[in-house]
Amino acid sequence: MRSMLMLYAALLLQQMPLLCVAFLQEGVSIRVAAPSRTGILIQHESSPTGAATADATNNSSNNNKGEDVPTPEVEAQVVCPSTDLKDELFDLAASTERGFKASREQRKRVQDIVKKLAELNPTGEPASSYYEGNNNSGPALDDATADLAGKWTLMYTDAPDIISLDSGGLGPIPSAAKLGRIGQECSPPYIKNVIEWTKPEFVKSLSLPFSGSDEDRILQKVVCEASATPADPTVVDLKLVGLDIVGDRGADNEDDSADGDNDDNILRRIQAGPAGLIGSTPLELRGFLTAPFGKFTVKYLDEELRIIETYQGYLAINRRQTPGEEW
């Protein structure tokens, strides 16, 4: 038995050079680098032929001067885990109707995704446009750094004061307005919290006079003055400064303003209902004093997605509006 084992070992040792040559001829090695903030770098090294690898091996063994051997060509591929997390977040936002109908388990999952995305946040100073003395109104087109400035549509929230907006009326009394989009207009030094009100379905079915068209809407904008500092570049402080109310009748806005303020125009605006009465010129209400309105922390920001956490610990997840989607 012992002699058979020794014979087997001798045969295996004889085959080892052949196995080593076979691996060298393949000339393939794979290295996985450490994870980065944006993904995992996978490097694949290969030689086009076995002969090239063999030549490199021979050159290395014949190099008596200690010169470095050129490394094989490297092809790199970046895998971004944030992409899958964002896709899941968008799906959850849609299935829970902006978080208004989210279950406890769904809210917990959103919190877990936000925590992971916060670790991958690609923007180090998301509130830079709100630094004192900075008059930026938005990121430059060729600027790779994302910026808070712009218009954002709410996709998900767990804030009770926002969720309660879609209560649908008081008991058996239906609501006189239907909740539309919610979002923010960020134009330094101001941030406006925007709520869109549209005509409810029961009013559309009644065809009441002086109620306007079905496409009319009213925008309610709570105006805040915002500020941030380089010492805490993810935190934005807010002060309440006023309220804007805007009536939007679509193409009819231009018809109303074309004839000036004559009697026919005034009558037409009255017949157009609330949106017509208010008109496209904002009704701006400003006080003499400003009042603290809290603050928020930017957890994640890129060119598409913004996640903030209020000082009470509630989440607001917004998507940047694209041309044609703006208020």
Image (spheres, rainbow, N blue to C red):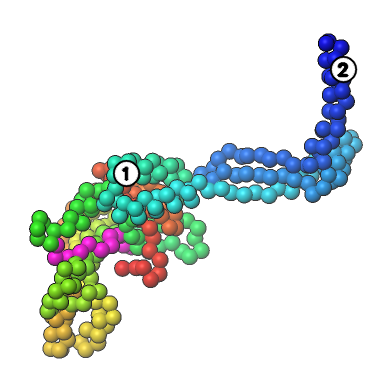
Taking depth in this image into account, of 149 and 113 the one nearest to the observer is 113
Query: What is the C-alpha distance between the residues marked 1 and 2?
Result: 66 Å
Badge 2 marks a residue whose secondary structure is helix
Residue in the foreground of this view, choosing between 212 and 322: 212
Image height of 261 relative to 284, above or below: below
Query: What residue do we see at 48% from left, 49% from top?
Result: 84
In the image, residue 159 lies at what x, y percent? 25, 48
Q: Earlier in the sequence, mark 1 or mark 2?
A: 2
Count the numbered circles shown.
2
Evaluate whether residue 295 shows in this view: no
145 left or right, relative to 151: right
Q: Nearer the viewer, mark 1 or mark 2?
A: 2
Q: Is residue 105 above or below residue 213?
A: above
Q: Amino acid at mark 2?
A: Leu
Relative image position of residue 320 (x, y in whole percent) = 39, 60
Residue pictured at 57% horizontal, 43% vertical: 40
Task: Name the residue that disc number 1 marks.
Answer: 107
| Magenta span | 175-188
Q: Residue furthest front?
A: 1
Q: Which residue is mark 2?
A: 7
How far across and how far down the image is residue 8, in percent? 84, 19
Residue 93: give x, y in percent of width and height.
35, 52
Decide whether the magenta segment is chiefly helix, strand or loop: strand
Give the residue type at disc 1.
Arg
Farthest residue to the top: give it.
Answer: 2
Q: Is residue 179 magenta?
A: yes
The one of 291 and 14 positioned closer to us in this rendering: 14
Residue at 15% x, 71% y: name it. 203
Residue 300 as seen in the image, left or right of residue 172 = right
Q: Which mark is residue 47?
A: none
